[in-house]
Structures are given as C-alpha cells and as structure tokens.
Amino acid sequence: MQASTSERTELVKKYSAVDLIFVLSSNQVDILVDAGFPRERVEAISFGFAPELFSHSPHMKKPGLISAVGFDRGRDYATLIEAARTINADIHLYTRPESVAGIDLPSNIIFHGLVPFEEYVKVLHESSILAIPTVELAYPTGQTVALEAAATGAALLLTESAAMRDYFDDQVAYYHPQGDPEAWSLRINQLLEDPQEVAQKGHRASEHVHANFLYLSMWRSIEQSLHNRGWLLAGS
C-alpha cells in the first residue's frame, strides 16, 4: 500500500533533521527519493549475519527436513499451507499462533509456535530446505532468516521480490510467484526427489552469504559511508 502525497510530505517533514538514512535494499532508495527525501541522504547497505552462530553444517542436515520460520508481517503462510495439501512430506512451522489464525492446518503441517533462540539455531542447522513465503514489501522481509539459514547450507525457497533479489539470485535460491501454492508444491515435491540438488543449492547459498553478507561487512559499509562524508576521522 502506497502512502498518499500528504502522508509522504508529513513523513519527510518529520525526519527532516535526519542527516543519513540507511535502507537494507536498493529498491528503497528510489521509494524514499520519490517521497521527497534528498538522494544524498539515503544509502542502501546490505544486512548481515553472525557466522560464529550460523556455520556451514552439511553434517547436521537431516535429509528431507523442511522448515518454515519467522513471524514478521510479511509472511504468507496461507500460501505455503495451501501448498502443503499436495506435498508428500511434513513441513515444520515455527511462528506465532496469530500468523496462522483461521487457517485449517493439514496434518503434514507440524506447528511448533515460537521457540527459544538456541532451538531456532538448531532448527536452521538441521533443516535441509527452508521455506520463507512472503508478500512483497518495500523492504526485504524475511532476509534475516534467509541469510542465517543459507549460512548453514539450507536450500532456500523464497517469494519473488525486488528487495530480496539484492541478497539472492537464482543460482543460490529458488523463487516463486507471490500467492502461488501450486508453484510451491511443485518445487518442494521435485526437491524431495533430488536430495543432491538440495545439497548443492544449499552449498552455493552458504558460500554466497559467507562471502558477502557478514555482520562485520555491514558495519564496515556503514563506517565507510560515514568516512566518505567526513563524519569520522581517518583511523577512527
């Protein structure tokens, strides 16, 4: 949903004293500039993950283990749950109860609710396939789970979005049209028949995020931006 002209004007006015706005995907730059923010005050950086917590772990992967994790407002579990009705495997779902309120869960959706962080880390390391169905928002909804799951070597199933494309291309993730349960069902059933493909995709994803999306890289990008603007002294 796009803000009205008056709402955008008010938003720009509210944040007029902010010298620099960082966004987590490049598509958001044009959105904010179009709203009225000066281009020189908006910069895109990439989010990162902690490699000491999420390491490449093919030895921990459980073949055929499919998980879906996360609870922000961009999740589209209705599509995944509909797809599950024609999927020949269980899908372990970790989210808030309200994220699936009013949806009839088929028997192969194993609902876990929310779990402690330590259990979340374990789930990502053990899952061979990680599903993140979303609606398209301006920001890369789901990117935290996606980065952390990819780091462990899980094969990613994502919904097509401009923002997420900043992080993953078709070489390292599987994309699906928004709200298309048939596409999700077809893909998952195909992958269940080809564990080697799953492992290879997960391996490429892990190499990709460990090379490009570490927390340290994110903070270095911020530091470099501040240096470029003369806001930090050299060597600080």
Image: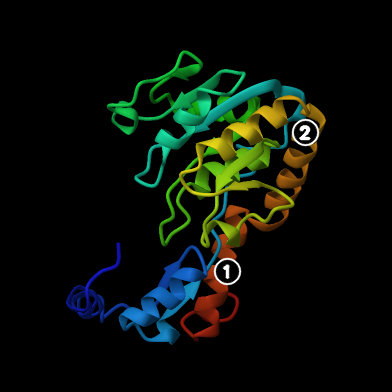
Q: Is residue 149 above or below residue 231?
A: above
227 left or right, relative to 170: left
State whether residue 184 is above or below residue 226: above
The quadrant of the picture occupied by the C terminus is: bottom right
Q: Splitting the image into 4 quarters, where does residue 186 fall?
A: top right
Which residue bears the numbered disc 2?
Answer: 199
Q: Is residue 187 above or below residue 232?
A: above
Q: Residues within 10 Å of mark 2 (few under 14, many from 20)?
A: many
Q: Residue at horizontal 55%, vertical 27%?
A: 67
Q: Position of residue 135 (x, y in %)?
A: 42, 49
Q: Earlier in the sequence, mark 1 or mark 2?
A: 2
Front-most of residues 127 and 108: 108
Disc 1 marks a residue whose amino acid type is Ser
Could you tell me which secondary element the residue under label 2 belongs to?
helix
Left or right of residue 151, residue 1 in this image: left
**Amino acid under disc 2:** Ala
For disc 1, the marked residue is 221
Residue at 54%, 80% in the rendered image = 227
